[in-house]
Amino acid sequence: MNKLSIVILAAGQGTRMKSDLPKVLHPLAGKPLVQYAVDTAAQLTPEKPLLVVGHGVAQVRQATGDQVVYVEQREQLGTGHAVLQARPLLEGRSETVLVWYADMPFLSTKTLRRLLELHAKHESPITMLTVEADDPMGFGRILRDEAGQVVGIVEEAVATEAQKAIRELNCGVYCFDSHWLWPHLTQLPLSPKGEYYLTDLVAMAVKEGKVVQAFKICDATEVLGINDRTHLAQAEAIMRQRINEKWMLEGVTLLDPSLIFIDATVEIGQDTVIYPNTYLQGATTIGCHCRLGPNTIVRDSTVGDGCIIEASVVEGAVLEEEVDVGPFSHLRKGAHLAKGVHIGNFGEVKNSYLGPGTKMGHFSYVGDATVGQGVNIGAGTVTCNYDGQRKHRTIIEDGAFIGSDTMLVAPVRVGDGAKIGAGSVVTHDIPPRSIAYGVPARVKGEVKEEG
Ligand code: UD1
Ligand code: CA
């Protein structure tokens, strides 16, 4: 039997988001809300968490893949009913069941660990998380007796004025003793709203003479739930500030953190400096000693040490060390720039490899090409890779010199050390170390060996 099973609730419709996208898939700092819960669960146990899903099952499955075990709740009959759906998979398989919601991205592993510790110390059927907060946020209120013991939870909708004044709130995070949980879940009464409330378990336990433990926290941010897009924006601001602070403490300089947007999925090396209006998104890794921005987007890319990217857009690209890009260039999917490549202004590279030290300074397009090392790509060079139906490759070998305004009509190869004169249209392969120019380009001589 496993010690711990985790159940994450995500079946609610999220009506207030007013969205075609299920609530838990809305991104927060570039990561779907549900992924925060999944990542937190992974820190607590290697056993996959159960995700209770209802609305948008197919979309959620697509985003979360096999990181979780799915449990479908076809009708949303309340939080108690939602947990009950996990019974066939979990009963008799674990000692403790930990439950929380997929829309609470700030809930920390540390807090959950402490909750589990408290639960382990006592023989309680339920150990719950509560928060003392000035703003009751519509949460259920914790009822305690004179001795200070928890005796129940009352939902805001049915609370008396006196109960509404209570500032200890139910976070919706619970540890249950599974032997007690499963049989009791089936006994939940139907609420006036026609739902089965998980919260009613508390009064049930107390009625049986059991003690319900509560672990009280003071930071309400931790249990901030995302219900509409104003909450999402608040959460985004808090998350972004935390991410920025983390990277500054790791040795990254942010010139103005309020204008720098780093997804939760990004890694950055020490002594990198980031200027305002820079967005680092998706599966992006930035090396040490880089300079990024201002006005730069790097998305799903790997950037090596010592790179400079200024006022440019880099997506789906790999930059090895000491590459410099921009201002005003665009690296697209499959661009792979080796060490020391220089891309100046108004350059575009797609699905191409550029070898070490190759330079492409001004107004050029390189697509579907393999370019060797030490190549000079003159201003305005274009690989004409598309014939209207298909894409073709251009190969430029080591040390070639491509004159300004050259059109390379693919498929075509420019040999090792060849020189192409300005304004040429290259329609046939050019042999190594030859000199060619014209429209169409013809071989007119040979490059003399130096020295
Ligand atoms: C619940 C608690 C309340 C607590 C608050 C904290 C109950 C009855 N009340 O209220 O005491 O203060 O959370 O946020 O539990 N869900 C399902 N299936 C369902 C219903 C809900 O999966 O049938 C999921 C939702 O996706 C959501 C979570 O459970 O993530 C909470 O449901 P919600 O209806 O928002 O509960 P609250 O009214 O906020
Ligand atoms: Ca809620």
Image (tube, grey):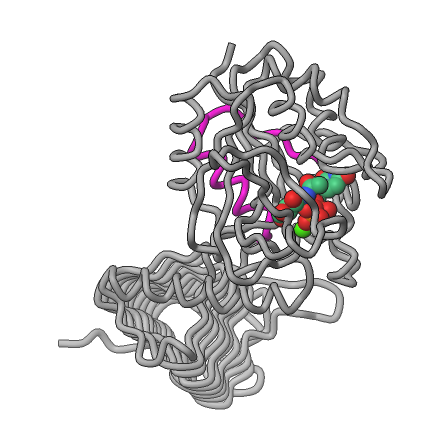
Q: Seen from this angle, which residue lies furthest front?
A: 146
Residue drawn at 40 percent across, 34 percent down:
113
Q: From this view, report whether residue 45 is shown above or below residue 183.
A: below
Q: Which residue sits at x=56%, y=48%?
A: 169
Quadrant where the C terminus lies?
Answer: bottom left
Task: Give percent across and percent down for residue 29.
Answer: 51, 61
Q: Where is residue 288 shown, x and y percent of the image? A: 25, 62
Q: Which stretch did the figure color magenta?
A: 32-53
Q: Quadrant of ligand 1?
A: top right
Q: How far across and how far down the image is residue 351, in percent?
A: 53, 62
Magenta includes 398?
no
Q: Is residue 373 above or below residue 38?
A: below
Image: 419 above or below 243: below
Is residue 166 rendered to the left or right of residue 197?
left
Q: Nearer the viewer, residue 22 or 224?
A: 224
Q: Is residue 265 left or right of residue 135?
A: left
Q: Residue furthest left?
A: 451
Q: Is residue 419 visible?
A: no
